[in-house]
Image (tube, grey):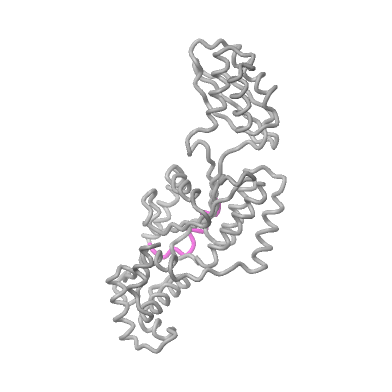
Amino acid sequence: MSGTITELKQLNERSRAIFRQIVETYLETGEPVGSRNVSRNLPMTLSPASVRNVMSDLEQLGLIYSPHTSAGRVPTHMGLRLFVDGLLEVGDLSEEERRQIQSHISVQRGKSIEQLLAEASEMISGLSHCAGVVLAEKQVSRLKHIEFVPLEPGRALVVLVGEDQTVENRIIDLPAGLPPSALTEASNYLNAHVRGLSIDEARERIEQQIATARAELDALTQKVIQAGLAEWSGNLGDRQSLIVRGQSNLLKDLTAIEELERIRQLFHDLETKRDLIQLLGLAEKADGVRIFIGSENKLFSLSGSSLIVAPFQDKHRKIVGVLGVIGPTRLNYARIIPMVDYTAKLVGRLLT
């Protein structure tokens, strides 16, 4: 933000008004903005020639550029960042939009967490006309059943069934010398002691029992149980589930082969997921809405796309995921920012 303040100080009132007019017109139309158009819509009287001089200065600062030989200009990614951070007047949702979001989210009450998040992603995609994206920790709400299934020698599948009928599984390595009966013993022990608990609660209880020697298990079976529960911590990609809806919205209004190539690359990034998950992981550490514009972020190759996300929390005020939209840099930021913020808060409220 300090960089934004420095750049804004370089702009006098006239330059700021012209820059704002260029960006707002571009966001509305998607077309390069000419000096004559700017001159007609300014709150002050300036000739097109005077506007062109200021536009030349703005271009020197790297805030706007000409996409081809026409006289029109569009904002650069740096210019959009300056506008969003320093000049954007974020609107508020209308009562009708709030009611629409609230009623759609509320009807998901009682559904599984995965269903709730998928519906939230679908809904925000429809309202924003972008791709909706949700990243959340994979979780079985409360444990109903745990099973260790032997695979090839030295490996087993851990299957967790939740009270909401969700099923999650992981592959674990087994300690050397483990007898086949140990997997059955581990399953029976866990089902007797952790039914109805969350994964974190189950892990804490088992660790306490083993630490205080109350676990009536041999050392190898204890290792199987600890490995099975610990595996659910995993790395970021394993622990989290990415839901993307409405990718087809990104194919609308494409006017050039370069734009089609950009969207093809974006679809590839969404399919590979890893780098997107890393980027959304950064957004989880934010307090409120985060905005990533175009190529300013090197974690993945969304050159020409913007990402607007907000975190949501569980009942312990712990951030458990983020929700938002991906679209072209020419987004209606003023409308989408409060939409993402409000939806994320409602999702968090429903989770608690």
Q: As displayed, is residue 303 above or below residue 161?
A: below
* Residue plotted at (64% across, 14% down): 216
Q: Where does residue 265 sit, x and y in percent of width and height?
A: 40, 51
The answer to whether residue 20 is magenta is no
- Considering every residue shown, the one lying at the far left of the view is 60
Horizontal side of residue 255 vs 223, given as left or right: left
Give the total number of marks visible in the rendering.
Answer: 0
Q: Where does residue 275 sit, x and y in percent of width and height?
A: 42, 45
The answer to whether residue 252 is magenta is yes
Locate the N terminus and report the quarter of the image it occupies. Answer: bottom left
* Residue plotted at (28% across, 76% down): 56
Q: Where does residue 352 sit, x and y in percent of width and height?
A: 67, 47
Q: Where does residue 24 sit, x and y in percent of width and height?
A: 45, 73
Horizontal side of residue 236 vs 142, given as left or right: left
Residue 76, quarter of the rendered image: bottom left
Q: As displayed, is residue 37 above or below residue 188?
A: below
Span colored in magenta? 245-256
